[in-house]
Image (spheres, grey):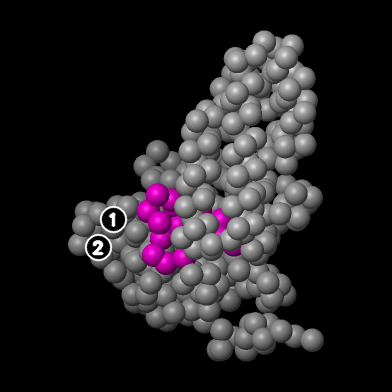
């Protein structure tokens, strides 16, 4: 039997789709991105562009495209530079759709992105946030790899299926440029905590409900260039990864920030317990550094279930803890 949300999808005029896009001095790329949004196989209902006080021709270019698109739109211009998180907050607060898509100014959407993600919402009533894979390319148009490759995300990972919060505490895997969220989730997370990016907040809260659904398709071309504010993490070689020391203090501090998100948006004791468990794991790893390698080996062996639970590369993290001071 169809759920109510699926009925909305089947009756397109009843399900409103918004796109929130933020811009800042994006004249070199924004036309290509807006045209890819305007020409979707499932047409969006509104585009809300929030500009962070650009000093180039970004607004002029966007206005020329949107006014001829046949799509309702708003262009909001901040009085002063707000930064990424508050700029998206401004855009989201003006969106009226049932589903809100998030867009950077410098990517390119595949023509079926909106349709494919809306279908995922339609067939998964519990979905609060849906995201896809992305094809990475550089300033010269050269294909690199995918966002899921960079994040080490595995769609069939048993831990992801069992506890998305546990999974996200071990590795970040949702890219804001590839995601869409129900308006109800966005409303629950406004105003955004400015210690985080908007996509971190939304995906974290949705993970606490086990309500994140991935689409195993590359639905955007994610541009990597020197002028972007936020990009995909660099892909390091095996030798570079092996030499990188773990910043335990920084990781423990991040757990406190996650506690702050839970208290602000969820007040979920179960989520706090999981965060406390991850924090205790990090504290033990830090403490074991004072022992010699022989002792460290046996103590870290006792933590192997936690390595498997929380680390992207459990064996690699285990060996690094044993070998390096």
Residue contact at pointers 2 and 1, CB within 8 angstroms? yes
For disc 2, the marked residue is: 78
Residue 143, visible in the rendered structure: yes
Q: Which quarter of the figure has residue 286?
A: top right
For disc 1, the marked residue is: 82
Horizontal side of 297 relative to 12 (left or right) equals right
Q: Mark on residue 165?
A: none
The reply to whether the magenta stretch includes residue 192 is yes
Q: Give neighbour class at mark 2: few <14, some 14-19, many 20+ (Cα, 10 Å).
A: some
- Residue 155 % position (x, y): 73, 52
Q: Is residue 61 above or below residue 285?
A: below
Q: Give neighbour class at mark 1: few <14, some 14-19, many 20+ (Cα, 10 Å).
A: some
Horizontal side of 15 relative to 63 (left or right) equals right
- Residue at image position (52%, 49%) is 258
- Residue at image position (73%, 41%) is 309
- Residue 171 % position (x, y): 62, 43
Quarter of the image that includes the C terminus: top right
- Residue 101 % position (x, y): 51, 67
Q: Nearer the viewer, residue 161 or 108?
A: 161
Q: Which residues are magenta?
A: 189-207
From mark 2 to mark 1, how far is it between C-alphas? 7 Å
Horizontal side of 304 relative to 96 (left or right) equals right
Name the element at disc 2: loop
The reply to whether the magenta stretch includes residue 194 is yes
Q: Is residue 32 above or below residue 5?
A: above
Name the element at disc 1: loop
């Amino acid at each position: 039997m169809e759920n109510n949300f699926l009925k909305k999808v089947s009756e397109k005029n009843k399900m409103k789709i918004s796109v929130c896009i933020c811009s800042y001095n994006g004249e070199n790329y924004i036309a290509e991105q807006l045209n890819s949004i305007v020409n979707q196989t499932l047409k969006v209902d509104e585009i809300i562009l929030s500009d962070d006080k650009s000093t180039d021709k970004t607004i002029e270019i966007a206005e020329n495209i949107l006014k001829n698109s046949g799509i309702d739109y708003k262009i909001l211009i901040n009085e002063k530079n707000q930064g990424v998180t508050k700029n998206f907050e401004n855009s989201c607060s003006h969106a009226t759709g049932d589903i809100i898509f998030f867009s950077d100014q410098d990517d390119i959407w595949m023509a079926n992105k909106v349709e494919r993600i809306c279908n995922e919402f339609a067939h998964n009533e519990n979905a609060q946030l849906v995201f896809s894979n992305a094809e990475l390319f550089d300033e010269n148009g050269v294909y690199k790899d995918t966002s899921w490759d960079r994040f080490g995300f595995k769609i069939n990972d048993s831990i992801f299926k069992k506890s998305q919060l546990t999974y996200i505490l071990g590795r970040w895997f949702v890219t804001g440029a590839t995601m869409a969220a129900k308006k109800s989730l966005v409303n629950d997370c406004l105003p955004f905590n400015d210690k985080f990016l908007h996509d971190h907040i939304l995906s974290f809260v949705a993970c606490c409900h086990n309500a994140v659904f991935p689409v195993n398709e590359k639905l955007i071309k994610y541009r990597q260039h020197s002028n972007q504010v936020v990009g995909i993490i660099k892909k390091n070689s095996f030798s570079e990864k092996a030499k990188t020391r773990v910043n335990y203090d920084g990781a423990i501090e991040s757990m406190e920030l996650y506690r702050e998100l839970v208290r602000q948006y969820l007040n979920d004791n179960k989520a706090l317990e999981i965060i406390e468990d991850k924090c205790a794991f990090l504290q033990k790893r830090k403490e074991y550094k004072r022992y010699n390698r022989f002792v460290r080996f046996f103590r870290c062996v006792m933590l192997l279930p936690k390595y498997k639970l929380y680390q992207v590369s459990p064996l690699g993290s285990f060996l690094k803890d044993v070998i390096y001071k």
